[in-house]
Amino acid sequence: MKLVIAALRSTLYTLLLIIITPFYALLILASFPLNHLNRYRITSGWAHIMLFLTQIICGVRYRVLGVENIPKTPSIVLSKHQSAWETLAFQQIFPPQVWVIKKELLRIPFFGWGLAMTNPIAINRSLGKTALKQIVRQGKDRLKKGLWIVIFPEGSRIDPGKRGKYGIGGAWLATNTGVSVVPVAHNAGTLWGKNSFIKLPGTITVSIGAPIDPTGMDTNELNARVEEWIELEVARICDKDITEVK
């Protein structure tokens, strides 16, 4: 019965998503003449609306541990990626930001168009060192503009309990700019699974670690340290007592 109710709620959420997104995309496109910060505010409004709907319709709420660890200056967020949920929530949790994304995401109708207006760092991961140089070059530009950079080092969504290979792009950017890394763990996939239509009600836990200063560290060392913290923290918060499915 609980799954049936969750399915009905998820259906309503999806219908509203389909209705709202095209109209909001037009608003986002109309914001093109504005500066990057005002464009971001308008674009992220869509994420705030969708996040609000997941709360009131699907019953998916969240809590944040370690808010005091969020630096006052632009930083690099390296996070676990389990769900589409965090792509919405991070826009509410962290200051104005850009993402390092796969270039092909920009081709998705409406969503990709809106994403392009946030001035992301869109890369072709198959280019190897060329992609890393692009991340550093554009990353420096975004940080100079006062924007945070969000990177999912595993590259794609990973099911809870599993671990993907941590790419070095985020650590590479940090060691080449001297900007601190903020590691983030969460258990969103336990309620909003990878490619799952049904969103289960409950509370997602997001845990923000202490910033890591890359000074004196090489890329692999920094990447390993971030991975260790994230994976240990994910294991800790993916506990039935922490995420309560109602």
Image (cartoon, helix red, strand yellow):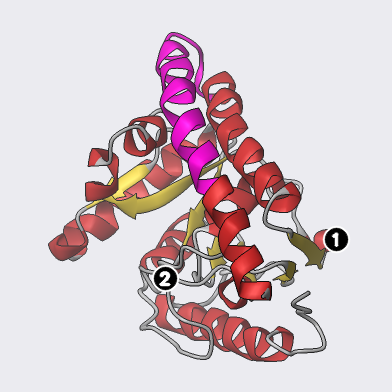
Q: Residue at x 44, y 87 (%)?
A: 163
Which one is closest to the eye, mark 2 or mark 1? Answer: 2
Residue 32: % across, % down: 41, 14
User: Between residues 90 and 132, which one lies in front from this camera angle?
Assistant: 90
User: Between residues 5 and 20, which one lies in front from this camera angle?
Assistant: 5
User: Between residues 58 and 28, which one lies in front from this camera angle?
Assistant: 58
CB of mark 2 within 8 Å of CB of mark 1? Answer: no
Q: Secondary structure at mark 1?
A: helix
Q: Residue at x 64, y 36 (%)?
A: 49
Residue 199: % across, % down: 59, 64
Q: Residue at label 2?
A: 157
Q: Amino acid at mark 2?
A: Arg
Distance, label 2 to label 1, CA atoms, is 27 Å
Q: Which mark is residue 68?
A: 1
Q: Residues within 10 Å of mark 1 (few under 14, many from 20)?
A: few
Q: Main secondary structure of the magenta part?
A: helix
As drawn, which residue projects farthest toward the right? 68
Residue 61: % across, % down: 76, 60
Residue 69 in the image: above or below residue 46: below
Residue 77 in the image: above or below residue 54: below
**Stretch of the chain drawn in magenta:** 13-36
Quadrant holding the C terminus: bottom right
Task: Look at the image and tell me whether residue 86 can be seen.
Answer: no
Of labels 2 and 1, earlier in sequence is 1
Task: Look at the image and tell me whether residue 240 can be seen.
Answer: yes
Q: Secondary structure at mark 2?
A: loop
Residue 74 in the image: above or below residue 246: above
Q: Residue at x 51, y 54 (%)?
A: 150
